[in-house]
Image: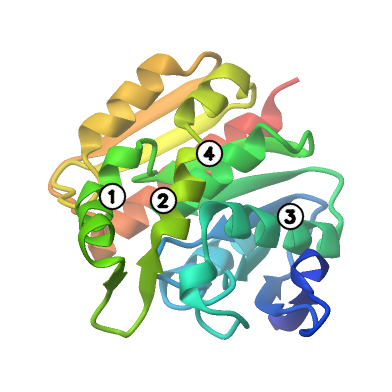
Amino acid sequence: MPDRHWIPIESAATNTAPAPEVAAVSHEGESDDWLFFCHGLRSDKSGSYEHRCRRAVESGYNAVRFDSRGCGESDGEFVESTLEARLTDLRHVVDYFDPGSYALFGSSFGGAVALHTAVTDERVEAVVTRAPVTTVETFDEYRATVDRNGEVTFDTGERIDHRFFDDLDRHPFSDVVDRLSVPTAIFHGGDDAVVDPADSFDAARRLEGDVLLERFAGEGHRFSRAGEQRLLERVFGWLDWVRSRP
């Protein structure tokens, strides 16, 4: 059975407020291999991530899904959930479980979280991304609204302001290009209207080392059920290859 955890982010504590906690769910596998999942900008650990974790367990992984601060069941405000905050959340979640090594799966903005983590944590042995955000231009429309109105407010009431973009500019994809050394897989829907598939092709061209890039014809930013099933078969087939390397 999956186990629920509340993980304090001590670095975010203040003199007037205790450390916020992020909600995580772990799925125990039958090996010492670990796979951590990073959700997208306005997503959370539920839905497809529960299915992905179950599939990971079938492949022998201990799988962990969690809500970044301001998302799902975790503490905090969405407006404070910058890339740096999400990198910090992931680091605390990984340290909580303390694996010797691990792989990452990041979707959309979670792909950016996974890629930037892979160049700062030597425990990362492989990165899988789906429609990863690899360029600040992905959010140009939101940036223009923030420049004009001071913030973007989504239909759910969630909002972002200049802090999101100030932080995003401090984490260019060139940092990843210069330092990424682990095997990387990029999967992208060919009809994605949210994150341009061309961005993934450009990212793959710039990255050195082992890079797998696959375009899923007919799939958008959210994959169909059949597309998701095919994605997972490809993901875990590729991870099996990574694990089998000498």
Amino acid carrying mark 2 in the image: Phe
Q: Which residue is mark 1?
A: 139
Say whether disc 2 or disc 3 marks the residue closer to the N-terminus: 3
Q: Tell me the residue at 83%/58% (across/down).
A: 95
Q: Report the mark closest to the observer, 1 or 2.
A: 2
Say whether disc 3 or disc 1 marks the residue closer to the N-terminus: 3
Q: Are marks 2 and 3 in contact (CB under 8 Å)?
A: no
Q: Which residue is mark 3?
A: 91
Please state the horizontal and vertical placement of residue 184, each as a whole percent of the image.
53, 30
Q: Secondary structure at mark 2?
A: helix
Amino acid carrying mark 4 in the image: Arg
Q: Quadrant of residue 4?
A: bottom right
Say whether disc 2 or disc 4 marks the residue closer to the N-terminus: 2
Q: Report the mark closest to the observer, 4 or 1.
A: 4
Q: Looking at the image, can residue 109 be seen?
A: yes
Q: Which residue is mark 4?
A: 170
Q: Report the mark closest to the observer, 2 or 3.
A: 2
Disc 4 from disc 1: Cα separation: 15 Å
Q: Residues within 10 Å of mark 2 (few under 14, many from 20)?
A: some
Q: Which residue is mark 2?
A: 165
Q: Residues within 10 Å of mark 4 (few under 14, many from 20)?
A: few
Disc 1 from disc 2: Cα separation: 9 Å
Please state the horizontal and vertical placement of residue 34, each as a whole percent of the image.
73, 53
Q: Are marks 1 and 2 in contact (CB under 8 Å)?
A: yes
